[in-house]
Image: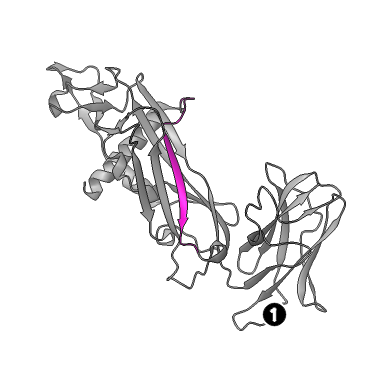
């Protein structure tokens, strides 16, 4: 299938989702999984090094107990268009080309069935595609060779990404599956505007995290904190846990391109609880300790609650964000 046809098929899936309204509260028939392929150590990318692309693999599988009917062309979807990135400041990064592509697309229409003119309007249709169920379920792997070619990932700091894939399934209901359209004789079609016999979903994948390296070199957090890279699942089981009431010194250094310590950067701290909640700090500004040549913020924890907290350090000079998780008990 050529590129315009693939775009058309995807546009029709999206158009049908808009017509459908809220997604039905049914088990989702597909599962989407993202994998970061060949990431550098710590999943930290250098923006000046094109030899290490941000390569993301999208895997889509039928996890339902049966075949799934959907619109033809789904398996040729350009899944890079369905990636959503959260940048270091919390903004959502998408690709604006997608909206323009869909706006230029049009649907097929069935005007008569068994030589009977459809009234009052024609039916928007797409040829059917069957995604196989057990024992050999449908599985697709799509590789985005370098996300930076499609998305604005120029800001330094921590990113998260997931896939959100609009998807429709169709039962054998005669209003949803059509075999007698005169204009497309001999073809099995799905009615993307059907009210019954159709279910609409947004398949949401897992989330990946990675970082774009700052133009100012951040060498990690100093003791008593332990950097997230030293444990396997810091957002669930942080590397270090402290007692509530403890004052925790948050310390780090910055270096420039000449490997000299930077002493005049502006750095702010925010404290976010995993699962919900943000700490209110009277003053969020780091000070530079000239004796020890490092930035310091003494974080009081007496007003915080037990759980896992993420400390985000935002360097105002280059917009980078550096994070570490801690536990409180």
Residue 284 falls within the magenta-colored stretch: no
Q: Which x, y percent locates residue 67?
A: 32, 29
Image quadrant where residue 146 sits: bottom left
Which range of residues does the magenta coloring cover?
24-39
Pointer 1: residues within 10 angstroms few (<14), some, or many (20+)? some
Q: Which x, y percent locates residue 48?
A: 48, 73
Q: Residue at x 63, y 61 (%)?
A: 229
Q: Is residue 326 above or below residue 277?
A: below
Q: Which x, y percent locates residue 89?
A: 60, 55
Count of numbered labels shown in the rendering: 1
Q: Residue at x 32, y 45 (%)?
A: 77
**Drawn side of residue 96 relative to residue 228, left or right:** left
Q: How is the image coloured?
A: one colour
- Looking at this view, name the residue that lies furthest to the front: 135
Q: Is residue 35 above or below residue 121?
A: below
Q: Is residue 247 above or below residue 118?
A: below
Q: Which x, y percent locates residue 3?
A: 25, 49
Residue 38 falls within the magenta-colored stretch: yes
**Drawn side of residue 248 relative to residue 40, left or right:** right
**Drawn side of residue 115 relative to residue 159, left or right:** left
Q: Residue at x 13, y 17 (%)?
A: 114
**Drawn side of residue 62 relative to residue 303, left or right:** left
- Say which element carries label 1: loop
Q: Residue at x 85, y 49 (%)?
A: 244
Query: Residue at label 1?
Result: 261
Q: Is residue 138 above or below residue 57?
A: above
């Amino acid at each position: 299938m050529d590129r315009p046809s693939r775009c058309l098929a995807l546009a029709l899936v999206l158009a049908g989702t808009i017509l459908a309204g809220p997604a039905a509260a049914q088990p989702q028939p597909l599962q989407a999984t993202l994998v970061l392929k060949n990431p550098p150590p710590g999943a930290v990318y250098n923006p000046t090094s094109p030899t290490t692309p941000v390569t993301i693999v999208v895997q889509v599988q039928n996890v339902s107990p049966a075949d799934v009917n959907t619109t033809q062309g789904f398996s040729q979807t350009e899944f890079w268009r369905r990636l959503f990135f959260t940048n270091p400041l919390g903004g959502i990064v998408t690709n604006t080309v997608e909206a323009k592509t869909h706006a230029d697309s049009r649907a097929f229409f069935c005007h008569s069935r068994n030589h009977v003119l459809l009234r009052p309007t024609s039916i928007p249709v797409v040829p059917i595609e069957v995604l196989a169920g057990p024992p050999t379920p449908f599985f697709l792997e799509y590789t985005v060779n370098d996300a930076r070619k499609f998305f604005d990932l120029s800001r330094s700091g921590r990113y998260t990404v997931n896939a959100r894939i609009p998807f429709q399934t169709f039962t054998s209901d005669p209003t949803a599956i059509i075999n007698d359209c005169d204009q497309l004789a001999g073809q099995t079609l799905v009615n993307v505007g059907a009210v019954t016999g159709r279910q609409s979903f947004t398949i949401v994948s897992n989330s990946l995290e990675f970082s774009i390296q700052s133009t100012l070199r951040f060498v990690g957090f100093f003791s008593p904190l332990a950097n997230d890279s030293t444990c396997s699942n810091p957002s669930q089981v942080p590397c270090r846990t402290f007692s509530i009431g403890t004052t925790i010194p948050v310390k780090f250094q910055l270096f420039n391109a000449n490997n000299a310590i930077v002493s005049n950067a502006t750095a702010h701290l925010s404290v976010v609880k995993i699962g919900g909640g943000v700490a209110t700090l009277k003053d969020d500004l780091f000070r530079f300790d000239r004796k020890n040549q490092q930035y310091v913020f003494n974080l009081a924890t007496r007003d915080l609650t037990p759980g896992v907290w993420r400390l985000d350090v935002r360097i105002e000079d280059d917009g980078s964000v550096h994070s570490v998780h801690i536990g409180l008990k």
